[in-house]
């Protein structure tokens, strides 16, 4: 699986847009990019997944440039409850993601 | 939204004792997983299970660990002789299966295992 690199931490204020960028230079043709969120003492929670260009759901947007060597998770108008660790994962959808490998993630702290 | 349930939420045991962690995956899911997270560290993959057999396991998942699906609803992780370093939060997860729908893993809230 392709290795990912994310910032260790980010700070933001309520109401701001937060963009977390993940590098995955060795992404393979079949790899999809998936983001999970984890609150303290809880299991990770799926946020969004994409292959190229832009994907948007009710929670976030995911921007993937043409070369797919990076991706950016965008959280619009964050609130205090968005304080969590965000993980970027890259894996082969065709193999079933049987072995998701979590990195250290990005610890987002949202302040009032 | 359907959810994965894990019991107990906390388990304290003595070193050398056997523990069984229990999970009820989402009912129509076919793939099951165990992950663990030592305090302050990464979420680590342990094992995946499909069609009543292990499909993949990590180097952490040694002979002290075993998994079982004893009936149609439960999925268990057994640690035969616990060590201090087994202390961690253990997460069960499930997914629908192969193909486009299986990329979304649903995680339980975890069992915090403390080995004394």
Image (tube, rainbow, N blue to C red):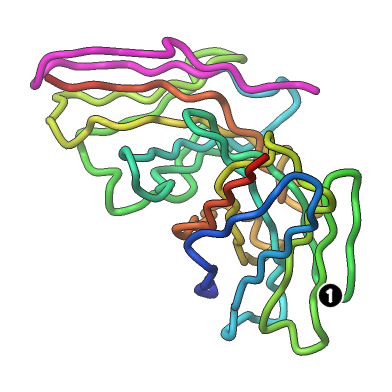
User: x and y percent of residue B115 in the render?
Assistant: 17, 22
Q: Which residue does the image show at 65% across and 81% down from the upper left?
A: A28
Q: In which quarter of the image is the C terminus of chain A?
A: top right
Taking the view exactly as shown, the residue that stands out farthest to the front is A112
Q: Please state if A112 lies on the left or on the right of B112 as rendered.
A: right
What's the residue at 61%, 61% (across, down)?
A88
Q: Position of residue A42 (x, y in %)?
A: 53, 29
Q: Which residue is at 73% across, 69% downward?
A: A72
Residue under the point 78% across and 53% down: A48
Relative placement, left or right, of B36 versus A42 is left
Query: What is the quadrant of residue B66 in the picture?
Result: top left
Q: Does the magenta stretch include residue B22?
A: yes
- The region drawn magenta spans B1-23
Extreme-left residue of the structure: B16
Mark 1 element type? loop
Residue A106 in the image: state x and y as whole percent: 54, 57
Which chain is indicated by disc 1? A
Quarter-of-image position of residue B25? top right
Residue B59, image x and y in percent?
A: 28, 53
Residue where numbered disc 1 is placed: A52
Picture quadrant of residue B106:
top right
- Would you say B111 lies left or right of B23 here? left
- How many numbered discs, if any? 1
Judging depth in this view, the residue of A33 and A98 nearest the camera is: A33
Crowd band around label 1 with a 10 angstrom C-alpha radius: few (<14), some (14–19), many (20+): some
């Amino acid at each position: 699986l392709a290795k990912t690199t994310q910032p260790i931490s980010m700070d933001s204020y309520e109401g701001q847009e937060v963009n977390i960028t993940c590098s995955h230079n060795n992404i393979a043709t079949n790899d999809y990019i998936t983001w999970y969120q984890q609150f303290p003492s809880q299991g990770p929670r799926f946020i969004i997944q994409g292959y190229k260009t832009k994907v948007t759901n009710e929670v976030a947007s995911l921007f993937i440039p043409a070369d797919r060597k990076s991706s950016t998770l965008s959280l619009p108008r964050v609130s205090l409850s968005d304080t969590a660790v965000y993980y970027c994962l890259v894996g082969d959808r065709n193999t079933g993601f049987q072995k998701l490998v979590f990195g250290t993630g990005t610890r987002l702290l949202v302040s009032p | 939204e359907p959810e994965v349930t894990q019991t107990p939420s906390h388990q304290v045991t003595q070193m050398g004792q056997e523990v069984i962690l229990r999970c009820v995956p989402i009912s129509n899911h076919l793939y099951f997983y165990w992950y663990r997270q030592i305090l302050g560290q990464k979420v680590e993959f342990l094992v995946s299970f499909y069609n009543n057999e292990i499909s993949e396991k990590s180097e952490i998942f040694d002979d002290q660990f075993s998994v079982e699906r004893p009936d149609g609803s439960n999925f268990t992780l057994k640690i035969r002789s616990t060590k201090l370093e087994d202390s961690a939060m253990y997460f069960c997860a499930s997914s629908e299966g192969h193909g486009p729908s299986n990329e979304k893993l649903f995680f339980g809230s975890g069992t915090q295992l403390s080995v004394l």
